[in-house]
Every structure is written in C-alpha cells, then in structure tokens.
C-alpha cells in the first residue's frame, strides 16, 4: 500500500462549480500536511498548508481528518485557471522530515 | 526567503553519455535536500535525499547517484545514461522534521535521453 494515495482523476468541473477531493495517508505518525499545485511541465508550488482545525484561503478550503487519516481540498467557484494537478504532501514525525507525495489529482475546469 | 537554483532547464543527451545536474539553495542553512524524478503523466518519485554534507540516502536502486559536496549544493549524476532516465528532474529543499516546513522546488530539468 502506498503511503499517500490520491484519486488521479481527472475531475472535469464546469466553471463556477465546486470540486472536492481527498488524499489518504497510511502512517498514523503523520504530522504535517500540505497541498501543492502543479501545472503542466512546471515544478510543484505550495498551495496551502493543512491545519488540524481546517483552514481556508480564498476559494480553497483544506481539512484534516486524523481519525480516518485523510486530508481534503475543496475549490469553490472554480476558475479556468484552477486547472492543474493537485498533489498532497505528508511529513511524519517518525521520519527525518521526509516528504511523502501523492501521485496527484488532475482537475480540469471547463467553460 | 529560500531560493533554489537548478540548471539546466532542458537537456538532450545520448544514451551512454554522462549526466550532471546541479542544484544550489540560498536563504537557509543545513537544509534537507531532495532529488525527485517525474515521468510524463506520472507522480513524483523520490530518488535521493540528504540531511547534511556528504549524507546521501537512496530511495530506489537505479543508474543515478547523488552527492552533496557543500551545505547548499546537491548534485545528481550518472556515468552512463539509459533511455529510461528520461524525465523531469526536480530538486527540492525543506521538510525539516522539527519545524515541519513545506518544500520548495527548483524549476526542474527536463531530460531527454536519445
């Protein structure tokens, strides 16, 4: 079983709609969580950190469910520019700071 | 703020030729450094990580090697490239356990082995 798993998608989303997807992790010692965005043929860039209480950044909302060991990302009022691959990243306390990446969820926002 | 320099951006190399990709970081000291590879349409595969000078850990057996001659320098090498070495190579810095920091990536090197 992979340490971090994501639905690869693609999630085809009409412009203006809401889309949400999850990322599950297997290591219960996971402590830090992040969402990254990767555009085609570019490096991943940090979208947002995920805090225990959940957090929001504009149209993006991230949540953490420790009991079920998953994090989620919700995008409201989708824009064409939101089309990208979204990667979740997990760091475990029992590691040296090793980043565990999911394979990514592709989101395609259509006009 | 941290900055990661990675070069070259694009590289086309023949099979059997050597490879050297360099990554340097600024704005931090004693960083954790990583080399990832991403095949077309695939996720990130961790190749090597380093927690300090001369300290290299390999995640998967392969045709590549890494070195960290200085605190802020991380080099990915190969003596003889294979076709399967083609991909998008990314250097990253971050992920310190104590501070639980996020990672920052260089702009990547797109390697095509022909």
Image (cartoon, coloured by chain):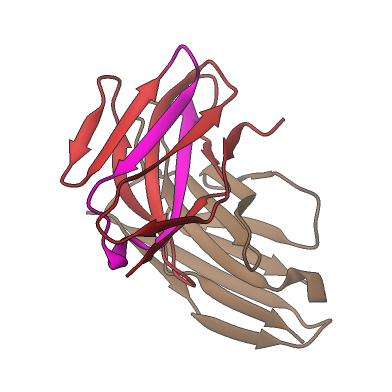
Chain colours: A red, B brown
State the image quarter where residue B106 is shown: bottom left
At 50% across and 20% down in the image, what residue appears? A69
Image coords of residue B92 (percent x, y)? 46, 54
In the depicted structure, whether residue B34 falls above or below residue A20: below
* Quarter that holds the C terminus of chain B: bottom right
In the depicted structure, whether residue B17 falls above or below residue B29: below
At 32% across and 70% down in the image, what residue appears? A111
Residue B104 visible in the snapshot: no
Left or right of A18, for residue A37:
right
At 30% across and 20% down in the image, what residue appears? A52
Left or right of B107, for residue B65:
right
Residue A71 colored in magenta in the image: yes
* Quarter that holds the N terminus of chain B: bottom left
Left or right of A23, for residue B65:
right
Image mark count: 0
Residue that protrudes farthest toward the top in the picture = A67
Residue A24 colored in magenta in the image: no
Residue B22 visible in the snapshot: yes
Image coords of residue A10 (percent x, y)? 53, 56
Residue that protrudes farthest toward the left in the picture = A58
Closest to the observer, A65 or B13: A65
Q: Which residues are magenta?
A: A66-92
Image coords of residue B80 (percent x, y)? 81, 75
Closest to the observer, B75 or A76: A76
Image coords of residue A91 (percent x, y)? 47, 31
In the depicted structure, whether residue B53 falls above or below residue A97: below
């Amino acid at each position: 079983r992979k340490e971090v798993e994501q639905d690869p998608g693609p999630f085809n989303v009409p412009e203006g709609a809401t889309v949400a997807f999850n990322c599950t992790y297997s290591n219960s010692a996971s402590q830090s969580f992040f969402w990254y965005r990767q555009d085609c043929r570019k490096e991943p860039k940090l979208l947002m950190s995920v805090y225990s209480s959940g957090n929001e950044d504009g149209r993006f909302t991230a949540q953490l469910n420790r009991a079920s060991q998953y994090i989620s990302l919700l995008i409201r009022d989708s824009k064409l520019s939101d089309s990208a691959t979204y990667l979740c990243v997990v760091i475990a306390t029992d590691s040296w700071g090793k980043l565990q990446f999911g394979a990514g969820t592709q989101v395609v926002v259509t006009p | 703020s941290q900055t990661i320099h990675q070069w070259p951006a694009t590289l086309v190399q023949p099979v059997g030729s050597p490879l050297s990709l360099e990554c340097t970081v600024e704005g931090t000291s004693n960083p954790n450094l990583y080399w990832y590879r991403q095949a077309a349409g695939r996720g990130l595969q961790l190749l090597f990580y380093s927690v300090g000078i001369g300290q290299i850990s390999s995640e998967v057996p392969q045709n590549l090697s890494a070195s960290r001659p200085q605190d802020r320098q991380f080099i990915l090498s190969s003596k003889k490239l294979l076709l399967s070495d083609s991909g998008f190579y990314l250097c990253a810095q971050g992920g310190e356990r104590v501070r639980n920091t996020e990672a920052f990536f260089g702009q990547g090197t797109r390697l095509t082995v022909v």
